[in-house]
Every structure is written in C-alpha cells, then in structure tokens.
Amino acid sequence: MLQSTKLYSNAQIAAVLTGSDALTAMRGAHEAMYRGDAVIQPRSRIALTDAKFSTMSAMLATERVAAVKMYTTLDGQFRFYIALMSLDDGHLLALMEGDELTRFRTAATTVLAATHLARANSRRLGVAGCGVQARAHVDLFIETFALEQVSVYAPDAGEAQAFAESLHGRYGIHAHATSAEHAASADIVVLATRAFTPVIHGASLQPGAFVASIGATRPDQREMDDACIERATEVVVDWTGQALAESGDFRLLDPTVLARTAVDELADVVGSGRKRAFDCEGIVVYKAVGNALQDAAIAALAYARLSSG
C-alpha cells in the first residue's frame, strides 16, 4: 500500500551507511551478477532544451528488490531519486533521495575494482578532481589501502591545496597539490572530473599502475588520452552494457585502438576471484559510468538499516 511507502532523505541515508558497508554491498551485487542473480536495464535519457531526465533500473535477486533510479540534470546539476520495490509482493518499499546513495556506491565500486586490479602494496594515490566523488573516493581508498601519500590535481590550484590540507588534517597522511602529470604517476590514479579533453596522458603512467576513470560519463567527455588505453594490459568496465556506449573515453578513442582492446566486466573479475600480483608491471584501466545494479544494492542496504530502526 502507498500509505506504507517510506520516504528517506539524504541526511537519513548518510547517517546509516559507511564506506565499508557500501564496499561489502557492491561486492555482493557483483557476485550476484556473475552468478546470473541480477539483471540491469541500461540508462535512458530524454531532453528538452533546458533540462534532461534520465532513468535506469535493475533487479537483484539476492536482496529480493528491484530499483529504478531517476534524475534530472538542470544547469549541469544532478538531482537523484531511487524507487525501491519488493520482488516478493511488488510493493513500493521506499522512495529515497539518491545523492548520498550515489556518492557511497560509486566510490565503493571503484575501490572494489581496486581490491582486485590494483597491487595490494600500492602506497601512492593520485586524484584528479576535488568534488563530491573525488572526496568520497579518497576517503575509502585511505580506509582500504595502506596509503602513504595522496597527490591532488585540480584546475583550480587553490582548491587542490585546500583538499590536500584537509586530508592531512583528518588522516595525518602526506597530501599535496600537484600537476596532472605528477598525479598520474601514482600507484593508484583516480579521475573524478567532467572533462571534455584528456586530463592525463598515457606517457605519465607508471608500470604496475591502476587507473580508475569515473567522471567522464557522456560521449563528449573524456579523462584519458588514447595512450592510456594503448598502454593498458587490461581494461575493465563496470558494465559493458553502458560503459562502452556512454563514455567519450571509448567513443572518442581511435577506433583502431579500441579494436585491439579486450574489455572485461567487473562482475567477471569479482565473481572469479581474480587478484593482481604484487609484482605485476602491467597497467590496468578501470572505466565506470555507473549503473543501476550499484543503486539497487546500496538502496537495499540503506532500506534494511532504516526500516529496522
């Protein structure tokens, strides 16, 4: 019944989730996808001259839920909502503000990929961006990996310096503002921008690096140049059903480079238990545009926490 449908705000959701919780939920969701216990519907976008509206959905059998994410894009700003439905009786369980859910699930999925595809002895993190996603990613990487240094790049050097200082103050870690080239030379590189031209170049990447590009999610946006993909010994995406079609990191790539590139899916990496060797010299690129499997998993977790209270 609609009377029993719960409405949850970003603040309520943030109060019951942690990064490690989200990481566990993302692992379970991708294992379910690997086993065939989850299905995803690709993103659909429609637009007027002054507004865009997007939807995407997924079913997750292990949690007995279906989820629909819907959001507007107005003046470049997103407003997310997620509707969560029961696969047992079909009821609408909850309508949730989706900003915090998106923040948690995106960072957790990237870190999940890194636990399999980055070297476990990685000590240096380079990040491009100072926004919500950049900050969420750095927080969870510091929590998950034994990092010793964080290098921050942003077009606004003052913002990068303030971000670095906040990281040092909160974690005591050595953090500094730097150039994009230097940030790209880290063991783990996170790109969380909405750039239209490459932020990093493949020539800057070091042997053994793990590169996660999560910010360029439109066909006209890209964060990596062709050489990043050319130098990669492995390319993994969060879901082939969206990433290859949606991101300019593939759409704007030289077609001959893409034709030579084998692309794996994160669910296959996680489900098979594949892990990166400590001494691996190859470069691994992970590209994500986000999908509704991640939304369903994090919404189910938040709902379980909120409804039990």
Image (cartoon, rainbow, N blue to C red):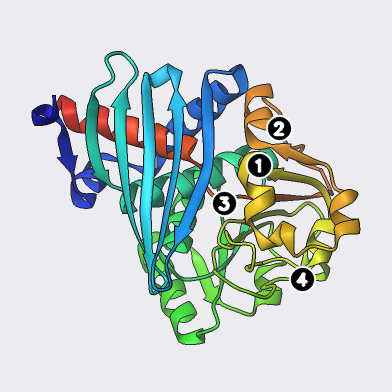
Marked residue nearer the N-terminal end (4 or 2): 4
Specify the amino acid type for callout 4: His
Q: Is residue 300 visible?
A: yes
> Mark 4 or mark 3, which has the lower sequence index?
4
Q: Earlier in the sequence, mark 3 or mark 1?
A: 1
Percent position of residue 241, x then y = 64, 40
- Distance Cα–Cα, label 4 vs label 3: 20 Å
**In this image, 120 relative to 96: left or right?**
right
Instruction: Name the secondary structure under disc 3.
Output: loop
Residue where numbered disc 4 is placed: 201
Q: Which mark is residue 120?
A: 1
The front one of 79 and 47 is 47
Quadrant location of the N terminus?
A: top left
Query: Which quarter shows the C terminus?
Result: top left
Quick one: label 4, few (<14), some, or many (20+) residues within 10 Å? some
**How many C-alpha atoms fall within 10 Å of the one at disc 3: few (<14), some, or many (≥20)?**
many
Eye-nearest disc, 4 or 2? 4
Dot 3 corresponds to which residue? 289
3 and 1 marks in contact (CB < 8 Å): no
Q: CA distance from mark 2 to mark 1?
A: 9 Å
First along the sequence among labels 4 and 1: 1
Left or right of 3, for residue 308? right
Residue at disc 2, secondary structure = loop
**Which residue type does callout 3 highlight?**
Val
Q: Which residue is mark 2?
A: 275
Can I make out residue 21 in this image?
no
Q: Residue at x 61, y 45 (%)?
A: 242
Rendered location of residue 8, percent (x, y): 19, 43
Are the residues flagged by discs 2 and 3 in contact, CB closer than 8 Å? Answer: no
